[in-house]
Image (cartoon, helix red, strand yellow):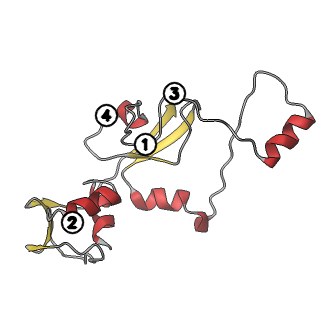
């Protein structure tokens, strides 16, 4: 498994942040500093961050959450908005499987199990999803045709 993916599975950081840790010279494998982003971690390798051992958890966490309005589906937001991960108390680095926009409410799964998340989200696994949208007013046939073509929603700040 590539080193950045391994670190993400360990809960150290996201894959991108893990790459920064690698390039900063903070990751070692079997006592040797690794700065090659293509490095492959093999079974039995001892990986460390700042000389502290890291391992893929043997027990994963799975949470089901009804996402409230005004929360976003990310672990970190540069704009300081509230994240769904703040609603779950965990020592693990959990993240939402999929996305609901800030104004949408609905069921979310949060986990630290990257393999499960990938199997649920990647198109090659063909997991069917259904979304239900409720409106204040009844939609006309013309409204439905517009929706099927796609609607641009302006960004709100």
Cα–Cα span, label 2 and label 3:
38 Å
**Disc 1 vs disc 3: which is toward the camera?**
1
Residue 151: percent from left, percent from top: 75, 41
- Residue bearing mark 2: 23
Around disc 2, counting alpha carbons within 10 Å, would you say few (fewer than 14), some (14 to 19), or many (20 or more)?
some
Give the numbered dot on residue 68.
3
Could you say which quadrant of the image residue 80 lies in?
top left
Residue 79: percent from left, percent from top: 40, 34
**Disc 4 vs disc 1: which is toward the camera?**
1
- Residue bearing mark 4: 89
Sequence-first tag of 1 and 2: 2
Cα–Cα span, label 1 and label 2:
24 Å
Could you say which quadrant of the image residue 132 lies in?
top right
**Disc 4 vs disc 3: which is toward the camera?**
3
Residue 148 seen in this snapshot: yes
**In the rendered image, the vertical position of residue 90 relative to residue 6, given as above or below:** above
In the image, taking residue 128 as reference, residue 114 lies left or right, namely: left
Secondary structure found at label 4: loop
Secondary structure found at label 2: helix
Sequence-first tag of 1 and 3: 3
Give the numbered dot on residue 121.
none
In the image, taking residue 56 as reference, residue 85 lies left or right, namely: right
- Residue bearing mark 1: 74
In the image, taking residue 108 as reference, residue 3 lies left or right, namely: left
Around disc 1, counting alpha carbons within 10 Å, would you say few (fewer than 14), some (14 to 19), or many (20 or more)?
some
């Amino acid at each position: 498994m590539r080193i950045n993916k391994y670190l993400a599975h360990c809960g150290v950081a996201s894959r991108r942040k893990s790459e920064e840790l690698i390039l900063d010279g903070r990751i070692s494998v079997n006592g040797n500093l690794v700065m090659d982003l293509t490095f492959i971690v093999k079974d039995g390798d001892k990986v460390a961050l700042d000389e502290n051992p890291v391992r893929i958890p043997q027990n994963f966490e799975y949470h089901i959450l009804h996402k409230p309005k005004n929360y976003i589906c990310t672990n970190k937001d540069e704009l300081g908005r509230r994240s769904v991960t703040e609603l779950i108390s965990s020592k693990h680095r959990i993240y939402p499987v999929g996305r609901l926009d800030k104004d949408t409410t609905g069921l979310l799964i949060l986990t630290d199990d990257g393999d499960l998340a990938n199997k649920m989200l990647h198109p090659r696994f063909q997991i069917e999803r259904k979304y239900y949208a409720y409106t204040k007013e009844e939609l006309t046939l013309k409204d439905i045709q517009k929706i099927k073509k796609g609607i641009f929603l302006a960004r709100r700040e």
